[in-house]
Amino acid sequence: MTSDSKHLYPVSENVLNRDFTAERISQKWVSDLAYIQTKEGWLYLTVIIDLFDRKVVGWSFSSAMTAQETVIPAWRMACRNRPIQNELIFHSDRGVQYACKAFRRLLKSNLITQSMYRKGNCWDNAVAESFFKTLKVKRVYQMTYASRNEAKMDLFRYIEGWYNTRRIRSANKNRFGRSIVSKN
């Protein structure tokens, strides 16, 4: 468990409420973080996934669990990759990285609606949880990473070389019933 939800920061309402559909890009993003074991110590991976096409639009690696090293760099990457032009819901767990003042200010300054899932209910963030399950089964549990840098390179290749570019996303069907693989 990577979430530290025992904090005094406010907890946002679950606005997403398990509605994992999106009609357009940058309408709903979900985020989570996971820890990856290396022989040098833990490597933390934070991802932000656009529910429209299930693409990982932002991600970051860190050796510490602060918002400045996890969710904020992932947020900045996501905003570069998918500029926000309309209303956006940002959904995550109740962890301190998402609830802290620095991240809340970042969302508020961009007029983003923050949503957090119910305590102890992983189904409320099923898309992000599913991403990490697949990542761990297909890559992490198959590897023994000697260093954080080795893990970073391998996970980068997984995210950008396979997941975002080659994986068929059945959640996003066009009018003819074929899966759309985003080029963005």
Image: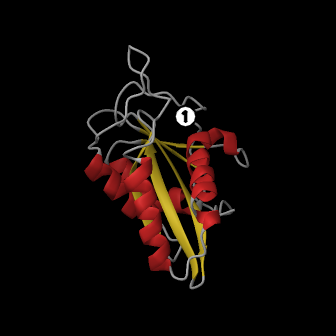
Q: Which residue is drawn at 42% across and 22% down?
A: 178
Of residue 4 and residue 57, the one placed in the foreground of this image is: 57
Of residue 121 and residue 107, the one placed in the foreground of this image is: 121
Of residue 3 and residue 107, the one placed in the foreground of this image is: 3
What is the x, y in percent for residue 40?
Answer: 56, 85
Q: Which residue is drawn at 56% across and 55% down?
A: 135
What colouring method underlies this structural image?
A: secondary structure
Of residue 76 and residue 55, the one placed in the foreground of this image is: 55
What is the x, y in percent for residue 4?
Answer: 65, 64
What is the x, y in percent for residue 121?
Answer: 71, 44
What is the x, y in percent for residue 122?
Answer: 68, 45
Q: Quadrant of the N terminus?
A: bottom right
Residue beneath label 1, please?
A: 15
Q: Can residue 62 be seen in this view?
A: no
Left or right: 131 as drawn, with respect to 118 = left
Q: Hey, which quadrant is residue 112 in on the image?
A: top left
